[in-house]
Amino acid sequence: MTVRPIRYLGDPVLRKPAKKVSRVDDSIRRLIADMTESMYAAHGVGIAAPQIGVGLRVVVIGMPDEEPFALINPEVIKRSGERRLDEGCLSVPGYRGAVTRSVAVTVKALDENGREVRVKAEGDLLAQCLEHETDHVNGLVYVDRLDAKTDLVKVTAPRTAADADDEDEEA
Ligand code: NI
């Protein structure tokens, strides 16, 4: 497993819709292992392959105190409700922004063994993360969803695993 550098806003790989994975094989599982390592090294709760420079539709989600899991070719197949949330992204370090997200989200994807899975979440960080990471593989970053530039705020405090809490997760 290798920690790979995070790509930042301005890198074209973040703006390009990623390619569908046609076969879930060992190379994809190695990618997932690297993404997981890279996510934890950056103290994130989620990561998408374009964030380490790989244009494939693969995401990893690692909720606090839970086992991380991968979603391949994730698609939001159901969403309902709206809520305003504070959001951050590993690819936009030092900033947070207020975005509108769904309350309930269902994602269809393949797991790391190529089996079809559905993940449902409602009103929590996972629901937010499912939309955030699916956006990434579609070439969207949360700053694209801001109503106004003033909704983006600079965060001055240094962030470490120790000072991260549920209010300032990045993905
Ligand atoms: Ni992100």
Image (cartoon, rainbow, N blue to C red):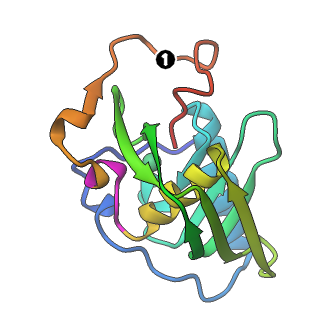
> Which residue is located at x 67 percent, y 77 percent?
108
Q: Identify which residue, 53 or 77, lies in the foreground.
A: 77
Is residue 8 part of the magenta span, yes or no?
A: no
**Residue range corresponding to the magenta coloring:** 139-144
User: Is residue 51 left or right of 14 when viewed as pictured?
Assistant: right
Q: Which residue is mark 1?
A: 159
Image position of 103 with respect to 149: above or below: below
Image position of 14 with respect to 93: above or below: below
Q: Quadrant of residue 55?
A: bottom left
Q: Position of residue 154 (x, y in %)?
A: 27, 23
> At numbered mark 1, what does the secondary structure look like: helix, strand or loop?
loop
State whether residue 33 appears in this view: yes
Q: Position of residue 114 (x, y in %)?
A: 77, 81
Image position of 168 with respect to 109: above or below: above
Q: Position of residue 57 (x, y in %)?
A: 52, 72
> Which residue is located at x 60 percent, y 89 percent?
22
- Amino acid on which disc 1 is placed: Arg
State whether residue 34 appears in this view: no
Q: Position of residue 135 (x, y in %)?
A: 43, 63
